[in-house]
Amino acid sequence: MPVVALPVQDFKLLSSGTGWVSTGNRLLLTTDNGAHWREISPPNPNQYSYDDVVFINADTAWVLNYVANTEDDIDFVVSSTVDGGTTWAATKIKIPLGDPAQGAPELAGGGAIAFADKLHGWLIFRYQTGSAFNSAGLFATSDGGRTWQASNDNPGFAGEIRAYPNGDVWVSGHPGVNEGGKIEELVVSHKGGNGFEDVSLPAPKDIGPVGQPSSYTLPVFEDNLRGYEAASYYGPNGTNSTEVLFETLDGGRTWKADRILSNLTGSGTAATTIAGSTWILPFAPKGQHPALVKLRPNDRKAAPPHSSSGDFSNCELSFVTADEGWMNCSGILSSTIDGGATWANIAPRVRNGALTTARVTPVRNVPIQVKDRALSAAPAPPPIGLPSGTDQRLRIPRNGRP
């Protein structure tokens, strides 16, 4: 059987050499920077796709599955492990909705989870309240996910969620266009999921006119006070967009623009990351080698020339230092230990579904019969800048979504 690389959907480099990947319904862990992978998937007999995966360290993790419309008595399953995936415990959750005939809301899709520590976590999901309107539900746990209770408050929309040990819960999502013209919002609760409030990030004056509303990622905090938040600003009438990194020194109550990267094509939000004091952005234009752009405090830069066919939104990053990190471009996972100067393909590989360390089976020339003439079909080229083998290294001997 041929050896093939698994496409990576989600991932995180937890510490030097140790990280995890999700393929959508499989979960894998490495402790040697992708040289070997170990299957740690929770039981999933119906092969439901994962809605979310959260690790707070290599031993403690949770996996969320949305199973509504397939099992009448279950809406979500939260699987948890405290031994690195050797054993899993599963909690089934039913969301009380009432009678739809009486105008009660219905579930409108999957959800997301966040854990501040081994005990305290939150589950957010979307209600469908009308043909064009959505609202959110928020559940909380204080026993590591064994039991869940409805929160007294919610942010008003569902999206990505992140929590910190000081009780702060952040949510970024797509509530739909409201009267103020917002497309995406960022809110925070400083009270463990109660009392959500809007976060204001005014566009810096030196980025020029802003046509469309901005979009936000979730903030990253290095302690209870200092944190960073990346925002995208789209120029008017199709002009280039700008990425801005904001900094807070008071736990997210006030923000100021710290770094700016301008002259970006396309409209996708860049999946940036912070490693120490370095802001790192992926840059992989079509037909060019994957690369990184790094900004230090107070930097103002213009992006290198690139076309809209490949821009900063094509790849995702996870770094533990400014030099060591993982990058996932369209499902192809690679690593660097020299700040992006060289990359190694570390995608997990399988033969007949089983993990292997063997190299990916090369694509062979296949004769194509056309009117009694045999034409040799050229093999598909490997991804630009990444080795077609597996444990080839393009360097000398993955992440950070906190």
Image: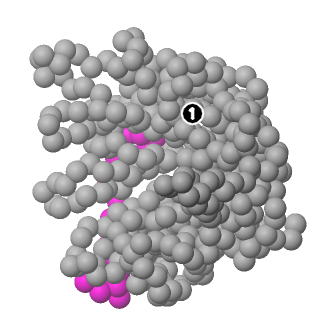
Q: Nearer the viewer, residue 24 or 371?
A: 371
Q: Secondary structure at mark 1?
A: loop
Tell me which residue sits at (66%, 56%) in the image.
365
Please provide percent x and percent y for residue 130. Answer: 15, 34
Verify whether residue 203 appears in magenta. Answer: yes
Q: In the rendered structure, which amino acid carries the disc numbered 1?
A: Asn
Residue drawn at 57 percent across, 77 percent down: 288
Residue closest to the eye, 401 or 9: 9
Question: Does 357 sit left or right of 234 as displayed?
Answer: right
* Farthest top residue in view: 73
- Whether residue 141 can be seen here: no
Looking at the image, residue 39 sits to the left or right of residue 106; the answer is: right
Quadrant in the picture for residue 179: bottom left
Q: Position of residue 185 (x, y in %)?
A: 31, 56
Front residue (pair 210, 114): 210
Q: Using the image, determine if residue 294 lies above or below residue 98.
A: below
Whole-percent x, y for residue 396 in the image: 86, 71
Q: Is residue 225 magenta?
A: no
Q: Which residue is mark 1?
A: 25
- Predominant secondary structure, magenta span: loop
* Magenta span: 190-210
In this rendered view, identify the residue nearer to me: 6 or 319: 6
State the residue at coordinates (16%, 61%).
Answer: 180
The image quarter containing residue 73 is: top left
